[in-house]
Image (cartoon, grey):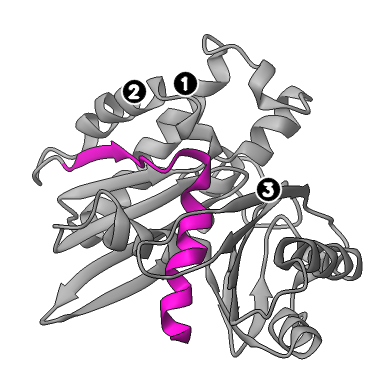
Amino acid sequence: MYIAIDVGGTKTAFAKIDKLDKPTISSKETISTPQSYDEALEKISIQIEKSSKWQKIEGISIALPGTVGNEKIELLTNLPDWNHKPLFNDISKKFNTKVIMRNDAVATARAERYFGLAKNEIRYLYCIIGTGFGATYVHRVGDKFLELPLEPEYMIVNSHGTHRNHFHTPGLLGAYATGAVIQEKTGIHSLASLEDSDPIWNEMVQYLGIGLNNLVTLFKPPVIIFSGGIIVHRKFLLNLLRMELAKYVEYLPQPTLKITEFGDDASLYGAISLLYELK
């Protein structure tokens, strides 16, 4: 039995996986993501115990929306108290099992290759638009796949623009194209109550178009696959993005834009895909 964990900026989801051949989510639980690392570690540990029901855990995978390296969290924009904390070691010691921890965009891009829309793709760009904005470029080389994690929300799209939270660089894409920023600008706790006709979506799409054009220019992906709460629940944004991207991508083939079929569970399937490294 395995446990897969998807840590999001606002919610953390847990899935119990009985077998890795043709994995299905046999049970799923969700908690609010604590801002404090110590509180988060306690709540995550409690939920792992509940999900496992005291069965032997063969492995635990964790997908996070940030930069992960050397078994430590290096940067989580929306969870700053988690930065440089030893989540990998804390979980592996507590449960005495194998643990794997990766960036969620890398994990979810891999899940699309294993189970989803990228099964037959040689190259593709994967973007998560939710509380933050993450991405991964995937390119098959021989019988292996290069997975290049990207941080597009730190891309400058307006040098005279606004600042984002504790970052001092003006005009970052993350200041215009993330769920966290929309909440800050509108004062709305739940984006579900925001009308599709609200002009803030048009502003977001304009800056996303600039950012995606830059990524297309660099990597020339034939396909871009999207996930994340923003675009999964606002599918009209995909057509707006197609029109916006068409304004810029005139010297390269227009990439095909798709939305994941995993819905809200996309990053959870990403965490599941990581478990194959533990076999």
Q: Is residue 49 visible?
A: yes
Magenta-tinted stretch: 255-279
Q: Is residue 12 above or below residue 17?
A: above
Choose the circle earlier in sequence order: 1 or 3: 3
Q: CA distance from mark 1 to mark 3?
A: 19 Å
Q: Camera-side residue: 39 or 161?
A: 39
| Number of residues whose C-alpha sits closer than 10 Å to that of mark 1, classed few (under 14), some (14–19) or many (20 or more) | some
> Which numbered circle lies on residue 202?
1
| Number of residues whose C-alpha sits closer than 10 Å to that of mark 3, classed few (under 14), some (14–19) or many (20 or more) | some
Choose the circle earlier in sequence order: 3 or 2: 3
Q: CA distance from mark 1 to mark 2?
A: 8 Å
Q: Position of residue 191 (x, y in %)?
A: 66, 25
Closer mark to the observer between disc 1 and disc 3: 1
Q: The residue under label 1 is which amino acid type?
A: Asn
Q: Position of residue 22 (x, y in %)?
A: 35, 62
What is the chief secondary structure element of the magenta stretch? helix
